[in-house]
Amino acid sequence: MRTSWADSVANSASEIAVSDNSSVPRPTRSTYVPPHLRNRQASDAPNLPGPATERATFTGTAGGSLGSRWSSDPPKPEMGRPGPGYGYAGAVAGRGGSGGGWNNRSRGWDRREREVNPFDDDVDDKTDDAEQAFSEQENTGINFDAYEDIPVETSGENVPPPVNTFAEIDLGDLLNQNIRRCKYVKPTPIQRHAIPIALSGRDLMACAQTGSGKTAAFCFPIISGIMREQYVQRPRVARTVYPLALILSPTRELSCQIHDEAKKFSYQTGVKVVVAYGGAPINQQVVIPSSLLRELERGVDILVATPGRLVDLLERARLSLQMIRYLALDEADRMLDMGFEPQIRKIVEQMDMPNRGVRQTMLFSATFPREIQRLASDFLSNYIFLAVGRVGSSTDLIVQRVEFVHESDKRSHLMDLLHAQRENGAHGKQALTLVFVETKKGADSLEHWLCINGFPATTIHGDRTQQERELALRSFKTGKTPILVATDVAARGLDIPHVAHVVNFDLPNDIDDYVHRIGRTGRAGKSGLATAFFNEGNLSLARPLAELMQEASQEVPAWLTRYASRAPYGGSKGRRSGGGRFGGRDFRRESSFGKNLDYYGGGNSGSGYGVPSSNYGGGYAPGVTSAWD
Ligand SMILES: Nc1ncnc2c1ncn2[C@@H]1O[C@H](COP(=O)(O)OP(=O)(O)OP(=O)(O)O)[C@@H](O)[C@H]1O
């Protein structure tokens, strides 16, 4: 019998206990290494290719004689952050530097701060009650081995081979320890392939199914690269900070989630992660929260941000991108979609970020429409295209159902589903259900209706304040309000454990949005259920939906097949990358693609942004405001 990946987590727990308590030598004062040099010693530096060696154009890399101490001793947990003399300033002084200045604390820990143990949060988050309910609801049959047979395609020059274990990739002791703390026993397929590529310094366009571990796939190489690098001298300009890595995502919640993950992965490594989200709508006065400014002043290596807030910081010269070595776009196709592309182009091409080929750029998503791939290639240099699983397809772990429901019957139909679910749930508890609707008003109205009908619900959408959004998410995660009514703002990236059911109360116009929405369940090897209410208003989605379901080995109702055969191909208008077959999804391989300029509204238009034409299935019906931040 094969042992599943998730099952082996239990075995790893005992390994963690052993490795945490046993032979890890504790540092003494005399042998203490400053945080930014903690992992370096010439004697045991591995001979690994890495961005530092590949991209030599960065200046300020000092101290070659110090080498790289890769198998490091973590500081004693009870020590918290070391005091003066252990931090950055001390190290600079020791190397003949001057100390002082805005950025000097960026790689060291100030005595007054203690690094909060991010692994405690998980425990705090769960009440015993909720925990028990969830573990009882939890899907059995978790099987990461299901991913083993997944088709993988790479294209590009000299693709580094994949690895099978984390041990094969030398990420450094401290990062490895955090990986064990996260209970990641072995890399997911996207991690197996993407991490060696990223560690070799190559640009990457990576596509893998929802919930398959893409966050770690770009975070590990970035953190490891920053740990591995020699001391990087950053400019000293008052009030301006110089991060080394930038991770962009489309929503505040997703940025916060990536930040939380990155904090776990970088715990006690000395790599400092800060999140900046929000940002002023156009024509409104920019108010950057003082808490964010204070946080930045304490130093930042990796900045996780939404584009709006990042532009605020850049325009106010509180931040410079001059030292960026790593740029990662999560949900990259959304980041380069109509709503965001001008902002992203401004950030990447019109500010002070190093050019492509100098910085390392990584783009990740579960969907990568061809015309977006083409836009994205502007930001990449000699990149590798990696597709794990069928590009833009949903995972087989999600059971998909489509029901024909007239607009006027949707509420009562939803009620039936929720009643049935409650009856089947553990102790009559409602399983976590995420209900997607098209508009913010629609979300509020459905939430109200559910509440007055005895189903505790909350909402998340763009008209709610950040505090309300955070509260709603928390209340949903803990099971206090087990129904979350959401617009597309919650469609991408959010990793909420135990979401049992995703209901597409209103179907999106774009099949890729559907893929991301249903991907909020069936994550990390667990199974999930997705129900869609389909009616005459969704005809353009009939064909791509039927195809997608077929690809994912789902039962397609006969009525949907009939609609699909009659309907024009909508819901993605030629955007789909691969269109139902695996292989050849790298747009560079499709020789005819570049000639078909219809997708681009005339190719590279005068705007320079390649703004898609009106036949571009951007995902929003006319007059519907974007739900994105
Ligand atoms: N190697 C691993 N072993 C076990 N669990 C993992 C591993 N890597 C990631 N996970 C877990 O899998 C879940 C999904 O990961 P993640 O959120 O990165 O998925 P994703 O591919 O980015 O999904 P999406 O496309 O929806 O953004 C997370 O809870 C994460 O902690």
Image: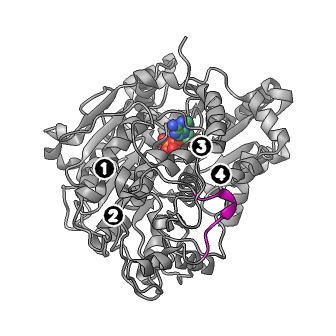
Specify the segment rendered in magenta. 75-83
Q: Mark 4 highlights which residue? A: 442
Q: Nearer the viewer, mark 3 or mark 4?
A: 3
- Residue at 61% from the left image edge and 81% from the top image edge: 290
Q: Earlier in the sequence, mark 2 or mark 3?
A: 3
User: Residue 405: image x %, image y %?
Assistant: 62, 31
Q: Which residue is mark 1?
A: 372
Residue at horizontal 58 percent and vertical 78 percent from the top: 84
- Residue shown at 39% from the left, 40% from the top: 169
Pointer 3 residue: 23
The residues tagged by marks 2 and 3 sit, at their Cα atoms, a distance apart of 35 Å
State the residue in front, 78 or 619: 78
Disc 3 to disc 4, C-alpha distance: 58 Å
Foreground: disc 2 or disc 1 = 2
Spatial CA span between label 2 and label 1: 23 Å
Q: Amino acid at mark 2?
A: Arg
Question: Which of disc 1 and disc 2 is earlier in sequence?
Answer: 2
